[in-house]
Image: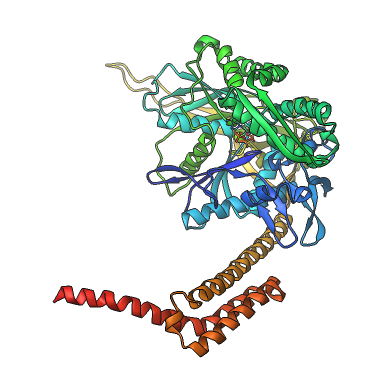
Amino acid sequence: MSVVGIDFGNLQSVIAVARNRGIDVICNEVSNRATPSLVSFGPKQRFIGESAKTQEVSNFKNTVSSLKRLAGRTFQDQEVQEVEKQYINAELVDVHGQVGVKVNYLGEQQTFSNVQLIAMYLTKLKETTAHELNAPVSDCVITVPGWFTDIQRRAILDASVIAGLNCLRLVNDLTATALGYGITKTDLPEDKPKNVVFCDIGHSSYSVSVVSFVKGQLTVRGTAYDRHFGGRNFDQVIVERLAAEFKEKYKIDVFSNNKALFRLRTAAEKCKKVLSANPQSPVNIESIMDDKDVATIVNRTDFEEWATETLVRVEEPLKAALEASGLTLEDIDSVEVVGGSTRVPAIKNAISKFFGKEVSTTLNQDEAVARGAALQCAMLSPVFKVREFRVHDVLHYPIKMTWAATPEEEETEIVVFDKNNSIPSTKILTFHRREPFDLEAYYAYPEELPAGVNPWVGRYTIKNVEPVNGEAAQIKVKARLNIHGVVSVDAAYTVEEKIEEVEEKQSSPKEGEEAKAPVTKKVKKLVKKADLPVVTGTTSLSRPVLEEFHEKESAMYAADKLVHDTEEKKNALEEYVYEMRGKLEGGAYSEYIDPSIKEKFISELNTMEDWLYDEGEDATKSVYVAKLDELKKTGTPVAERYRESEERPRAARYLTQAI
Ligand code: ATP
Ligand code: MG
C-alpha cells in the first residue's frame, strides 16, 4: 500500500510518497517534479497535466486551468465572475448549480462540473504515482489552503472519491509544511516553544501561519490569508504595463484578443521569473496579433516600481497572523518561506523587513507542502511507523448552529466552533425538545468568507424525539469538526437523570484511628437512554451521483487509455516498416533473405506505409496489432538468421578460449 501526499496547486501540483528511507517527490511522464494543474479536451481524448500544457494555446477554448479556484463555487459567484473568469480560457457555465465548463470533447459540446474536472486531474496524478511506484494508489493526503470552507473542502473530497482515492485527511497546506519542518528537527525545546512563521505565496493565494513547536508536537497559533495574492497578480502588473506599451508602440490592443492576452500573460510570467535572478529580462512574442511581433526589455527596478501597490499587500497577513497568535515580533524565532512567488526578491525583502530578520529557506520551496502531506499520510496509514508527532491545527472561520425557538428556550443559535478551535474536535450540545427538530450549521460571519461562497454548511434533522413523562426530553447532539476541517453531526441521543448511590471518599484514617464506616450519598447522574437517528443534508454529492461520476470518469479514463495504446501500436507498426525496410535495402539484413522474397517483402512494407498514411491513419488497436503480426511472419525469420550469424563468431571465440 502506498502512502501519498498531494499538494494540489492552482498552477501546478506536487506529489510526494513516503518510502522506507524517507519522502520522495514523484516525477511525471516528462520527468518534471511538478505537474501543470490543467485539463484539456480533444476530439478523441482528454489531455491532462503536461499534455494539456502543450495544448494550451492550440486548444485554447477547451483547456481548463485554475481548477483549485473553482472548487465548490457556483457560476454566479462574485469571485468567479470578477476574478477567476479572466484567467480561464474555457467557457464557464452553470452545471447543476455548480460552476463548470462547456467544452468540445469527442466532437460534441459537453459540460463538466468543477468537482468532475478536479477528479479528472486527481485521476491523472494517481496514475502518475502508480506508474512510478509500480503499485496501485489509494490512500492519500491532499492539501488545501487554510481558508478553504466546508463546501470547498467537500468538493475536493468528492473529487477524490470520484478519482478512486481514499483521502485520509485534507490538511491545511502550511500545517503540512510545519509538520515536515518539525518532524526532522531533533533539537526542539522541551518547554519554552520555538515559534516559527510559515509563509506560502503561490500562484493565486497567500497564507501565513504562526506555529509553536516543542518536542514531539506543533500547535498552530494563528493564521491569516490574502486569498487573492500570488504570482498571477504580479504577472498581471507586467501584462498591464506591456499591453499599454504595445498599444502605443505597435498599435495593438492585447485586451481585445484573448489568445494574445494569454500569450502575453505567459511571457509576463517568464519575464517575472527571469527578473528574480537578473536585473533585466527581454520579452519577445512572435506574431502576437495582427501578424505583429512585439519586443521589449523590462528592468527589475521597473517591475518593482510597477508592482508597488501589490507589494504593500505582503505585510497585512503577516501582521494579522502575528496578532491572531498572541505573540509579538520578539517571540518569533524564525520565518520560513515556501511557494514559488517567495522567489521574487521584493516579496522576500518585504517579509524580511516586517520581521526584522532574514527569511529562511530551510525547506524546499516547491516541495515542502507535498512532503509534509506525505508525512501526514504516513502517520495516518497503518503501514508505516513514523515518529510520534502531534499536530494541533485550528479552524479559520467560526461556525454556528441555529435552530427554531421553543417556548422553553429563547436562544436560537450558538457559535459551536470558534476561530482557532482545534481541528479535529467534538462538541456536545444540549436541547430540550418534545418533537423532532432541525439544526442548521452556517459560517457565523459570511462576510469573512471568499465572496460568493455559500455560508450554509449543513442541516441535521434529529428524529424520533418524544416527550418523557409529559416533559421535554433532554437531548445531546454530538457536533464534530472532523479531521478534514469539515462539519458533521455524528450522533444524537436522549439522556435521563438517574439517582445513583456512590460511596463518598473518606480521608484515610490517621494512625491509631479506626477506619470509618463507608458513607454513601445519592447523586444525580445523566445517562444515555437511546440513540436518535440523524438525517444529514450537506453540500457533498450524494452517493448515487458520486457513483455515477466515478463510472463516467472510469469510462473516460479507459477511452483515453485505448487512444493512447492504439497510438502506441500504430507507432510500433510504423517504426517496424521503416526499420525493416532500411535493414533490407542494403542494410544488415540484405544477405539473410532470399532475393525473391526480399522484393516481395519490401513491396509489402511500402504498401503498409501507404496504408498508414491513408485509410490506416485512424484504425483500431487490434488492426495495427494484426498488421504488425502479419509483417513479422516474414520479418522475424530474417532477423533471427541475422542474429544467429552475428552470435556464431562470438560463440566460436568463447569456445576457443575455453579450450
Ligand atoms: P497556489 O498555492 O496559489 O495554489 P501553486 O501552488 O500552483 O499555487 P506555486 O507552485 O507555489 O503555486 O508557485 C507558482 C508561482 O510562483 C507562479 O506564479 C510562478 O510564476 C511563481 N514563480 C515560480 N518561480 C519563480 C521565480 N523564480 N521567480 C518568481 N516567481 C516564480
Ligand atoms: Mg501552493
Task: Say if residue 228 shows up in the picture.
Answer: no
Ligand 2 falls in quadrant: top right
Residue sticking out furthest to the front: 586
Q: Nearer the viewer, residue 450 or 398?
A: 450
Q: Determine the image quadrant of residue 421.
A: top right
Q: How many marks?
A: 0
From this view, report whether residue 70 is shown above or below residue 549.
above
Give the left or right position of residue 44, taking residue 35 as reference: right
From this view, report whether residue 19 is shown above or below residue 245.
below
Where residue 490 appears, x then y in whole percent? 64, 42
Where residue 188 appears, x then y in whole percent? 40, 23
Where residue 22 appears, x then y in whole percent? 40, 42
Q: Residue at x 45, y 18 (%)?
A: 193
Color theme of the render: rainbow
From this view, report whether residue 99 is shown above or below residue 329.
below
Q: Which of 450 and 457 is in front in this view?
A: 450
Q: Determine the image quadrant of residue 568.
A: bottom right
Q: Determine the image quadrant of residue 239.
A: top right
Where residue 623 appears, x then y in whole percent? 64, 78
Q: Which residue is drawn at 68% across and 40% down?
A: 68
Residue sticking out furthest to the bottom: 596
Task: Say if residue 516 shows up in the picture.
Answer: yes
Quadrant location of the C terminus in the rendered image: bottom left
Residue sticking out furthest to the left: 659
Q: Which of 580 and 426 is in front in this view?
A: 580
